[in-house]
Image (cartoon, rainbow, N blue to C red):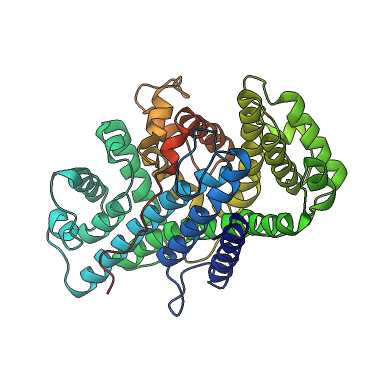
Amino acid sequence: MTEGSSRASRHVLAALLLSTVLSAAPARADDGNTPLEDNRHITGFYIQIAPTFQALLDPDFQPGGTSSVRPSWFLFAPHASQSAGKGMLGAALARHLLDAARGRPSFSAPEALGRAGLTGVPHLSLEQLSLELMFQGLPTDAAAALAALTTAMNAEALADPRTLTRTAARLALLYWSAPAWHPLDKAESVVLTLERTLHEGNVAIFTDIGGTAAAYLTWRQSAGTVTPERVLTEFSLPGASPAQARLAYDYALAHASDSPRPHAFDAIFPGMNSQNLMVAGLALYEKARLTPGLQAREAFIAMANNYLAWREQHDIVQAVFTPARPRWDEVSRSALMRAMTPMLVVHFGPLEWTLAGYAYARPDRDGNPLTSQPTEYNWAVFWDRWPPILDSFELGYSDPEALWEMPEPLKDPLAH
């Protein structure tokens, strides 16, 4: 297969994966894809498309290999998508526990967790969280189900008793606020809220940025010789304008080597539609391709990544975390994300980034020794998660070859 036909095949595959996921409902559908099935499609799309963008940035990169050149946003994407999928897997396990409890209630937290195979030393933190929730007045099965939401998260964060007790208190408040009467229905409302939030965010990012990537690669394939100038003037997105995209592009060229790297784009470009940052980011990838010096090339890549990540987090995900019209059958998404925040973890191949590690490495935000630093963040608040996300990028930049160890597909181990 020639290089051109190989690239065309990847474009076709990207388009097929895109159409597959876009045909799914934006929330759990009993007659369609489950959230975990959508997540596998989305993660697979990013795995397929990341090498195409890396080939732009690293002329020595070979598909199937690794690259020591700083990666694009699209190589971080499959790992982040996989993390969201693990949260959906936790929700699926919690639902299995609730379904089993509707047939026969459990007499202890270990029994309830054991119904999903959640036993043994690695899951002692789940038992501890279950017991804390029971102390808050939750029935055994409801407590176990909410604890199961943390199955694939950073359980070590709960080793801090301040985090454990605060997390249990927050989950208990959500349980008591749930719009249902039966204990298992109240717990299911919390579980469903987390699953929908992660699923809708996963699909929304994919639809927007994944859709832009597919459109860009299609345009690029037919454009002939591509330059940053042509991207800025010829590749268009809804809401973007060549003048605004050029403004963002020129700013990036002038400030790519700043330390710290520019990231407060609402202040830098007040009122600018972030689609212009997307266009500028793609032009920056092309600029990096044409830049011979590795240091300058990687500076442009990092600025492009920040532009794409800003649109992802500031304009796409934020609307999912704090919807304008909350659903009647959910608990507060923002409060639920606050409860889950201390245990957040992302794996970039062998590299591990945790919110707890980030928080403990920084000054105590409230100055109160009775509260742990990780509990002082809320992932649903943009400025609480934006600096940590940029920090996770820096971890990836420190060992770019590690990111090429792609995540394995997630499957519900209890599905039939």
Q: Quadrant of residue 154?
A: top left
Number of callouts in the render? Answer: 0
Which residue lies most toward the front here? 2
Residue 53's spot in the image, x, y percent? 60, 47
Residue 163's spot in the image, x, y percent? 32, 35
Q: Is residue 234 above or below residue 115?
A: above
Taking depth in this image into account, of 2 and 270 the one nearest to the observer is: 2
Q: Quadrant of residue 8?
A: bottom right
At 78% from the left and 47% from the top, the residue drawn is: 231
Side of 376 relative to 152 (left or right) = right
Side of 317 relative to 374 (left or right) = right
Taking depth in this image into account, of 361 and 287 the one nearest to the observer is: 287
At 42% from the left and 52% from the top, the residue drawn is: 82
Which residue lies most toward the bottom here? 31
Quarter of the image with the C terminus is: bottom left
Taking depth in this image into account, of 180 and 22 the one nearest to the observer is: 22
Side of 260 relative to 63 (left or right) = right
Side of 340 relative to 148 (left or right) = right
Which residue lies most toward the right here? 243
Residue 391 in view: yes
Residue 415's spot in the image, x, y percent? 28, 70
At 50% from the left and 49% from the top, the residue drawn is: 63
Quarter of the image with the N terminus is: bottom right
At 16% from the left and 54% from the top, the residue drawn is: 109
Residue 336's spot in the image, x, y percent? 44, 49
Q: Is residue 12 above or below residue 217?
A: below
Residue 313 in view: no
Taking depth in this image into account, of 60 and 414 the one nearest to the observer is: 60
